[in-house]
């Protein structure tokens, strides 16, 4: 068992709680009909099967590989979760990007689009800490606002292809951004366990804090599963 798995199981103890790998616990699609989401704007689109509860994928950026990750997820859902409506929750800026527009065109039959409203003002502390932390706070608040706009009773699951979009700090300080809905995430920048897993490299200054935050985030009872991707740090 890896160091990351040790941390997951140590934090969970003997209680029922979050899983350590994506899909370990899984989830069942509800069969009961749910109210359709609110009316969409010109930049939004409902999936054609919107009478069923939706899986929401939150990806607030589109300038790099983000939408390709979403593409892989939607392709897999099409194969294994036939009939499940999928909503891409993103920012207005990302929705205008060609990467996002191509994604929406390619999956027009199953993928709907909703816009997550970014806060008009920054949080003074995270703005002072730097642009990176300010952006994560803004994305975290946009997630909460976006889910509220869709309405939680119409959502069955929330998926973050990049946990770093909101970050461990925001997931720990503001667990309410998920509105009590079950969620899962893929963590790309979690690195504190690398040396224990045999990846050569120096210990970084923030590793202890990252480990502390990670162990607390995975105790969130709504977190269904977490997948950490091992990387060399230069990818």
Image (tube, rainbow, N blue to C red):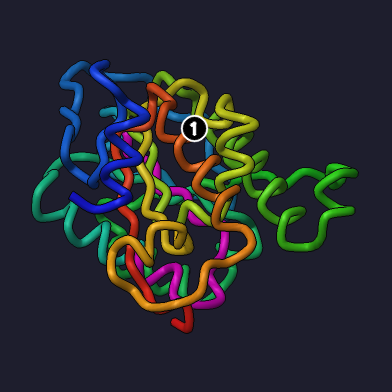
Magenta stretch? Answer: 54-69
**Left or right of 187, for residue 39:** right
Quarter-of-image position of residue 66: bottom left
Vertical arrangement, residue 217 with respect to residue 188, above or below? above
Q: Which residue is drawn at 41% across and 55% down?
A: 187
SS for callout 1: helix
- Label 1 crowd (10 A; few <14 / some 14-19 / many >=20): some
Is residue 75 visible in this depiction of the protein?
yes
Quarter that holds the C terminus: bottom left
Task: Name the spot of residue 146 as percent of width and height, x first.
Answer: 58, 38
- Residue 63 or residue 101, whichever sits in front: 63
Q: Would residue 63 appear left or right of 190 to someone viewing this image?
A: right
Residue displayed at 56% across by 76% down: 63
x and y percentages locating residue 166 in the rendered image: 58, 49
Query: Which residue was labeled with disc 1?
Result: 216
| Vertical relation: 100 (above or below) 172 | below
């Amino acid at each position: 068992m890896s160091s990351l798995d040790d941390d997951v199981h140590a934090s969970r103890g003997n209680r029922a709680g979050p899983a350590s790998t994506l899909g370990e616990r899984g989830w069942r699609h509800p069969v009961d009909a749910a109210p359709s989401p609110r009316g969409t704007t010109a930049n939004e689109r409902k999936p054609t099967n919107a009478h069923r509860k939706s899986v929401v994928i939150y990806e607030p950026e589109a300038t790099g590989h983000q939408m390709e990750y979403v593409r892989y997820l939607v392709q897999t859902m099409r194969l294994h979760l036939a009939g499940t409506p999928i909503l891409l929750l993103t920012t207005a800026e990302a929705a205008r990007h060609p990467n996002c527009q191509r994604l929406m065109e390619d999956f027009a039959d199953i993928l709907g689009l909703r816009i997550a409203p970014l806060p008009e003002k920054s949080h003074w502390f995270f703005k002072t800490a730097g642009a990176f932390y300010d952006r994560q706070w803004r994305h975290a608040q946009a997630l909460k606002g976006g889910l509220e706009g869709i309405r939680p009773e119409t959502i069955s699951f929330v998926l973050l292809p990049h946990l770093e979009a909101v970050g461990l700090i925001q997931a720990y300080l503001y667990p309410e951004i998920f509105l009590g809905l079950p969620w899962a995430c893929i963590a790309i920048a979690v690195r504190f366990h690398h040396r224990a897993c045999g990846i050569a490299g120096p210990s970084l200054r923030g590793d202890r804090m990252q480990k502390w935050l990670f162990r607390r985030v995975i105790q969130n009872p709504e977190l269904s599963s977490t997948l950490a991707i091992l990387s060399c740090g230069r990818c």
